[in-house]
Amino acid sequence: MSENFADRLLAACEQKNSRLVVGLDPSYTQLPAAIKNHRAFNDETDPQAATDAIVEFCTRVLKVVAPLVPAVKINSAFFEQYFWQGVEGFWAVVQEAKAHGLIVINDAKRADIGNTSQRYATGCLAEPGEQLDGFVGPDALTVNPYMGGDSLEPFIKTAGAQNKGLFVLVRTSNAGAAAIQDQTLSDGSPLYLHVGKLVEQWGGGVVGARGYSSVGAVVGATNVAQLAALREALPKTIFLVPGLGAQGGTADDVAKAFKADGTGAIINASRSIIFAFADKKYEGQSFEAAIEAATRETNQQINAALGR
């Protein structure tokens, strides 16, 4: 039986001395000219051409970042918008990432009720294997807890059986999150803290040898006090932390997601890494060189904030 997801993730972080996850959100309009202007890729209105373009871009990004980071987070929506061609493209990028030895998080934010959740869990977490010519699936999935524990139970069971992971939305980094997630309950606690404690409870049956559960939490970096409060309240939960870079979070901010030993979180950066070539500081470099430089710099910033 393969290793518990949380243990695998921690080992990968230590092997590369990196807690950085590169987010693949391949917006066609932001692709580098070297790809977008190629005659086979230069028509966003053609689903196949657009898919081929974003797959080519992601393939080249993966080659650059694979030696430097433990994991990538692939936002499935950027592929699904191109219909069945995009779905095929998503799977092609998953295969490429896995071939590089990366842990792959499918950022699909799935959830529903009853047997619908089970179908989502199977489609997103089960290994397709021989049914799809030996394809391998992602290692983890983001899920939405709004409908309650019964809606997530199929995901938790499937992830446990497959030694995969989940990251449950707890306190997200978007501007509108406070209107729901910061609401105060009758006991005086905020809703996000209540959800976080449920996540710790739901993941109690899949705790690995390192003391962390394979059911993690998505906690944004844009409110440091909330991040620190959740870290203290959820000792067995690994945080997937968005909000670094383009959303305004700093390395010092995200350091609050970690325990004193430097474990307990992975930090996602998407646009600030994959579109680094658009930053004036990298002007004159190839897009791959800019992405590599941004990845190395972000790794260094996070490690410095952690004293590593």
Image (spheres, rainbow, N blue to C red):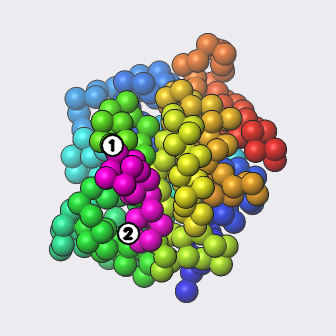
Residue 34 horizontal/vertical position (percent): 50, 25
Give the labeled residue for mark 1.
Answer: 183
Residue 211 image-quadrant placement: bottom right
Secondary element under disc 2, as helix, strand or loop, is helix
Residue farthest along the front direction in this orientation: 187
Q: Nearer the viewer, mark 2 or mark 1?
A: 1
Q: Is residue 251 magenta?
A: no
Q: Is residue 195 magenta?
A: yes
- Res. 66 in view: no
- Res. 113 in view: yes
Give the labeled residue for mark 2.
Answer: 125
Magenta region: which residues? 184-202
Identity of the amino acid at label 2?
Leu
Say left or right for 184 vs 33: left
Image mark for residue 21 = none
- Mark sitting earlier along the chain (2/1): 2
Residue 149 horizontal/vertical position (percent): 30, 69
Viewer-nearest residue: 73 or 240: 240
- Labels in figure, total: 2
Secondary element under disc 1, as helix, strand or loop, is loop
* Magenta span: chief secondary structure: helix
Is the residue 29 above or below the residue 259 in the image?
A: above
- Residue pictured at 68% horizontal, 35% vertical: 252
- Residue pictured at 31% horizontal, 52% vertical: 186
Residue farthest along the right direction in this orientation: 307
- Residue pictured at 81% horizontal, 47% vertical: 308
- Residue pictured at 58% horizontal, 23% vertical: 277
Residue farthest along the bottom direction in this orientation: 1
Identity of the amino acid at label 1?
Gln
Is the residue 287 above or below the residue 21 in the image?
A: above
